[in-house]
Amino acid sequence: MEKLVSIIVTVYNTAEFLEECLTSVTNQVYKNIEIIIVNDGSTDNSAEIIEQYTNADSRCRSINLTENKGVGFARNLGIEQATGDFVYFVDSDDFINEHAVKKLVEGLGNKTYIIGRTKKLTNKEDSNIEIDELAVTVRKRKKVFKVLQNLNVLNSLFSIEIIRKYNLRFSEDTDCYTEIAFLVPLFKNRTVIYQVKESVYFRRLRNDPITNPSLMQQDREKVLKDFLTVYNYLKEEQKGKNKEQKLLDKLLIHFYRSKFILIMRDATQIERNFEQLANAMEKVSPAQFKNQNLLVRGELKALRNHKLKNYKRAVSIHHFGRDSKQTFTSKTKLTRQIYKDIFQKRPLNEKKIVFESFLGKNYADSPKYIYEYMVKHYPEYEFIWSFNEINHDIPGNAKQVKRLSLAYYYHMATAKYWVNNMRQPLHLQKREGNVFLQTWHGTPLKKLVFDMNEVYSANPKYKQQFYEQSRLWDYLIAANSYSSDIFKSAFKFDKVMLEDGYPRNDTLYINNNSDYITKMKTKLNIPLDKKVILYAPTWRDDEFYEPGKYKFNLKFDLQKLQEKLGNEYVILLRMHYFIADDLNIDGYEGFVYNMSKYDDIAELYLISDILITDYSSVFFDYSNLRRPILFYTYDLEKYRDQLRGFYIDIENEVPGPLVKTTDEIIDAVLNIDKVTIEYKEKYDIFYDKICGWESGKATEKIVEKVFKNN
Ligand code: C2G
């Protein structure tokens, strides 16, 4: 008779991930399972999803708690309800390989406890791993404490006998580290741990710790305090049991060295946490200190004896040692240290401004227009521009510094004002009196940050880091009320929103005349007798060489375009600044111009007669010119549905046709007057919504608000 496995899934507000989890559980190759789903008072629609599974699969049943009781309580309830021979836990935001349970059962034999392998998941592809369906490779791990210190009950098979024998339960009065109570008695007599290589569990690294943190993503001090609470409780509960006491002490010291030391840095932090930590350390048997090095032993003793002063001294030496080891191994770290310790202590210059656009790549966008206005009207200021290469030909007397160089840090530390159109480096710190004007770099079409519903991302810390960075922005520019609403939700922005239009769009009102256009075309060597098509697409999240370096293939037939349109038009190709590929336009000289490296796209807007784009925010700006726009959206379904999601209904709201092939482009261009008439009504509505605040005076209004008021 096949043994029954009780799978316990505890759920708290994980609707986003739950289907993937429960499907992976119900699809197990090992069929003799019961699935106990404990809904721990979820307030999202987790309950509905659970119901679908309990209705469809008789092996599933659920327990609904009316209020959130915590994962320890919920798992204990699951254990009490289990009727199986074995118990297996899954977290509701994770999922498992279809062979996971079968492999563990086979590997377990007549042992009482076995573990599988956990794989951290940052993107969907990570789960495409090959599993040998026949193999069950059981490894013996001798370093038992190393397994224990991970404090993990996931992807393990526990025999019900061992759970009953030691009465294994989770503790219930903290959010985190409830597993210690379950694992310590289980580990006390073990000299070896068995592991099945082919049983794989996918642990999701959640990427939105701000809106929906996982338990361990809560405030670090709080998480560690939970550790101490559990430790204190168990020391008392397991009194007289030597082996358990020893394991608990080892865990505390391990946690001290790997985690607590990181929050014991400045004086206030230390004072805040000292007593609690000292009280716990007092309970440790001094024999445990022997294995530590001298420095750590000093800290532990100071804690144990409640000697705050001694502790502060010892710990500062410890940190100094750690920091200087890091500082002198890398130039970057040394530069940052100088920034923090020396530059940040210099006086703040009330009349200095540092400008940057597109991470130092261009002299462009709103920072450029704000700078040029200030050069004219506020010449008493000192202006700094941050560039990746210091070779930009710019008006005025700005000093150019190389981004992230020592000079850059000096000016960032001492300038009162920062003007940037993208996020600043994470390690920059604001000083008292600093003013940060964030211009942002486009009206959004693609969902941004906290509105992005993506479950995977290249960088699981993205949302959290974005949140921290955007807390430093004092002013944010919204070109229209549509953007203003989005920024409030997507960035959780709650400081001053400047609602005066985009500085970068002023030029589209001031310079929209034939003199300017002739002058620009001449400067760029574009024939005056030809009309101009600008092709400016965006980037694709899933096509990259490495983060920040994206791929792009031209998806149209240049030869055909030249044959049909070459007499009347030229084409300017303008790749997004994230695109690393160099376009090859050999053979199309005189028809195709590569403008990807050109600084300011606004100048290209002004000289072009038609814009072709896709999901780039360029069309919002371009619509200020009221000229025709074609949307070359050959991968619409994938881009919209899989990659990002949009804020507007692209099929119905945008002011031009969606075209999918080279022939359709040619057809639309040859009939551009007809297209213009066809889209007139939509264009008018769109213009009112997006361009209503623009009048050519945004720069002036914004400068007066930001620099006069401060
Ligand atoms: N851009 C450009 N050339 C392109 C595409 C974009 O110069 N081929 C510039 C435009 O100024 C555009 C800005 O980069 O407004 C942002 O480009 P998007 O394609 O919209 O993409 P992204 O950088 O993801 O920014 O809220 C805006 C969003 O964040 C979009």
Image (spheres, rainbow, N blue to C red):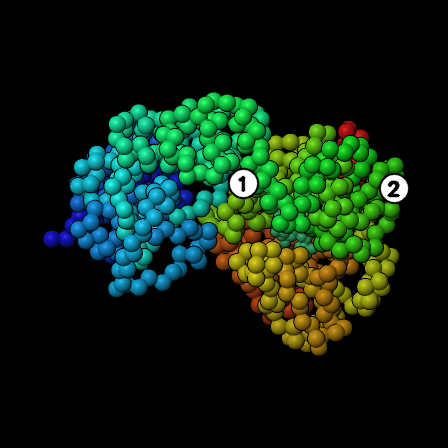
The residue depicted at 29 percent of the width and 56 percent of the height is 139
Earlier in the chain: of badge 1 and badge 2, it is 2
Query: Tag count in the figure?
Result: 2
Report crowding for label 1: few under 14, some 14 to 19, many 20 or more residues within 10 A (C-alpha). Answer: some
The residue depicted at 48 percent of the width and 48 percent of the height is 454
The residue depicted at 45 percent of the width and 23 percent of the height is 305
Residue 273 on image: x %, y %: 49, 26
Assign the C terminus to one quadrant of the image: top right
Q: Element type at marker 2?
A: helix
Point out the frontmost of discs 1 and 2: 1
Residue 376: image tag: 2
Kind of residue at disc 1: Gln
Q: Quadrant of residue 601?
A: bottom right
> In the rendered image, which residue does mark 1 sit on?
464
Kind of residue at disc 2: Lys
The residue depicted at 63 percent of the width and 45 percent of the height is 327
Residue 547 in sight: yes
